[in-house]
Structures are given as structure tokens and as C-alpha cells.
Image: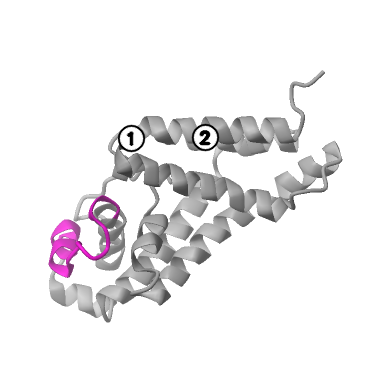
Amino acid sequence: MPRPTKQTPERGSARQRLLEAARDVIRAKGFAATSVDELCTAAGVTKGAFFHHFASKEALGIAAAEFWGSSTGALFAGAPYHTPADPLDRVLAYLDFRRLLIGGETWEWTCLVGTMAEEVHQTHPDIARACGEAIFGHAATLEADIALAMAQHGIRAPSAASLARHTQAVLQGAFVLAKAGGGAEAGQEALDHLKRYVELLFGKGES
């Protein structure tokens, strides 16, 4: 997912700063290992301010997943991969764009909601559901272009929704491999394989 823009404590409301702190600290350390005190320090707010905005750490986790979905949604909505006239070119440009986001510290380009979903799907199901809404919601933004490309190329299977979800499965898997020691190279490799798969599926480059 998108690399963050670091915020200073003076910018934005206390709630906004806590959400930005959660976005960064949880990606770096995980949900369980991140304390309320640590989030308050990172956000430059008091613990009283935390509990004014969030009834619990779990409530913060749910709100952070929703914040991630809305903020990354805005980034992707304005990204240049929407420019090509051909829908298949837009899909491939999306994959190129995702590859370009890989770089820097691993936590900077991996996914908050993927990180939390893996960790809390049994212990905090409400957070996991919020994470799922962000992940599946983003996948759904790809469906229209995929469906148009499939119609133009006479492809009936898999469904556009299934292929859109598959792109996210590959991305989330790439993030896991990166965290397991593969680093940026593992993420880039996964995107390269995914792009080749899409090109083969659509017969791009075939005579």
C-alpha cells in the first residue's frame, strides 16, 4: 500500500494524528505490540485525548482500518494508471504503479489492513472485518476495467471480481514474503509474475 507522509504533531486534529500514528506504528510493530502510550507519544497527544476519541484500542484499530481504506482510496483514485484509453492497459498500469510504491523500509510500503487482519482475525474479529472491507473494497475498484478488458478480448473466465481479488492476494502474499526476509525484491518479483500472468491471460504480445 502507499508509503506514508510523516506528519508532525502540530498538524491536524488529535484524532487524525492518532490515526496517522496507528497507520505507521502498527505497520512497523504489529497491533498487539503497539501500546496506547506509544500511539499517544507518536501522535503527540495525551492518553486522555486518546480515550476521548476512542473507547478502546480495538476501537482505534477499527477506525485505523477505515482511515486506511479512505486515505489509500483517494491516492489510488488520483493515480496515473487511470489515464490509458485501453482498459487492459489501465489494469497493467495499475500493476506497474503498485510496483513503483515498493521501496524504503518494509513497513513503509506494506499494508496496514493486511498486517492487522493476519494478526487479529481470531482475537479481534471486528477489526478483521474492517480490514476486509478495505481490502475487498479496493479490489472492487479494479473490476470495471478488468470486465471491459475481458469483454474486448473475449475472455469469460475467471470473473472480473475473482481476478481483482487475485491481484490483492498476490500483493498481500508479497508483503508477507518481504516481512519474512525477502525485502523489496520479493515484492517486486511478485508484481512481475502477476503482470506476466495477466498478459498471458489476455494474450498480450501474442502474434
Query: Which coloring applies here?
Result: one colour
Of the numbered discs 2 and 1, the one sitting upstream in the chain is: 1
Based on the displayed image, in which of its 4 quarters is residue 174 positioned? top left
Specify few, some or many for label 2: CA neighbours under 10 Å numbering under 14, 14-19, or 20 or more: many
User: Residue 11: image x %, image y %?
Assistant: 25, 55
Q: Could you tell me the amino acid type at mark 2?
A: Leu
Q: Could you tell me the amino acid type at mark 1?
A: Gly
Q: Residue 155 vs residue 142: left or right?
A: right
From this view, report whether residue 12 is shown above or below residue 78.
below
Q: Are marks 2 and 1 in contact (CB under 8 Å)?
A: no
Q: Residue at x 28, y 52 (%)?
A: 24
Based on the displayed image, in which of its 4 quarters is residue 88 positioned? top right
Specify few, some or many for label 1: CA neighbours under 10 Å numbering under 14, 14-19, or 20 or more: some
Q: Residue at x 50, y 51 (%)?
A: 74
Q: Farthest residue toward the top?
A: 207
User: Residue 40: image x %, image y %?
Assistant: 16, 65
User: Residue 120: image x %, image y %?
Assistant: 35, 68
From this view, report whether residue 162 is shown above or below residue 171.
below
Asked whether residue 77 is in view, the answer is no
Give the camera-side residue of 132 and 137. 132
Give the camera-side residue of 75 and 25. 25
Name the main secondary structure of what is drawn in magenta: helix
From this view, report whether residue 47 is shown above or below residue 183.
below
Q: State the mark number for residue 191.
A: 2
Q: Which residues are magenta?
A: 27-44
Q: Residue at x 60, y 53 (%)?
A: 165
Where is the C terminus found, in terms of image quarters?
top right
Location of mark 1 (residue): 183
Element under disc 2 = helix
